[in-house]
Image (spheres, rainbow, N blue to C red):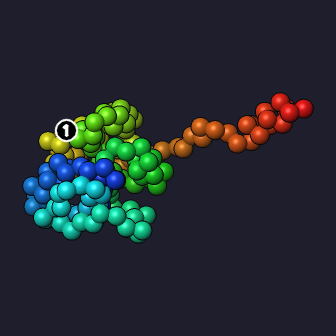
Amino acid sequence: MKILVTAGTTPFNSLFAHLDNLTYKFPDMEFIGQIGNGDYAPETFPSFRFTNEFPHQIESSDAVITHAGAGTVYDLLERGKRSIVVANLERQDKHQLEITRYLNDSGYALATTELDSLEALLHRLKGFKPRPYQKIDFFLGDEIYQNLLTALR
């Protein structure tokens, strides 16, 4: 099983350090990490900072371990990608806690706020089937257009 690990642009050194200590327990999993602006490069699996091939990296992976950044999370949901979402508590703001809780409660992803639970989630990953995600448009273009036309008349 090929697993992409991504931190986005924000450092998430503790995630990669924690995974460095777990990969030997999962010999059937091949990890590759996108460390972004982090200082920690994993020793037990290859990593890179950024690439223009990132969408291909996601598609070619069987699953993704990701920070709880909204852009990455919603991209994975729309693709129906199996994922483990880990709140990055190294950030000053703690908005990733809410996203993580929502994903966990909804069944869209395996999600955690604790790195210590990552091993258990990796054991569950193969059998995990995420609940299908239905994208909801926040802005209805036609409705806005019709309202604008009505207001201009």
- The residue under the point 79% across, 35% down is 148
- Please give the name of the residue rendered at 10% of the width and 61% of the height, measured from the top-left corner: 24
Closest to the observer, 33 or 82: 33
Mark 1 nearby-residue class (10 Å; few <14, some 14–19, many ≥20):
few
The residue that mark 1 highlights is: 114
26 displayed left or right of 48: left
Q: Is residue 25 above or below residue 95?
A: below
Q: Position of residue 67 (x, y in %)?
A: 31, 47
For image coordinates 42% across by 43% down, the residue present is: 70
User: Can residue 68 be spotted in the picture?
Assistant: yes
Under mark 1, the amino acid is Glu
Quadrant where the image shows the C terminus: top right
Q: Is residue 59 visible?
A: no
Displayed quadrant of residue 52: bottom left
* Vertical comparison of 99 with 32: above or below: above
Q: What SS does tag 1 mark?
A: loop
* Residue placed most toward the observer, 44 or 134: 44
Which quadrant of the view contains residue 55?
A: bottom left
Expressed as whole percent of the image width and height from the top left, the position of residue 57 reads 37, 66
Nearer-the-camera pick, 125 or 147: 147
Give the percent coordinates (x, y) of residue 85: 31, 45
Q: In the rendering, at what x and y percent does residue 44 appear?
A: 13, 65
State the residue at coordinates (29%, 63%): 49
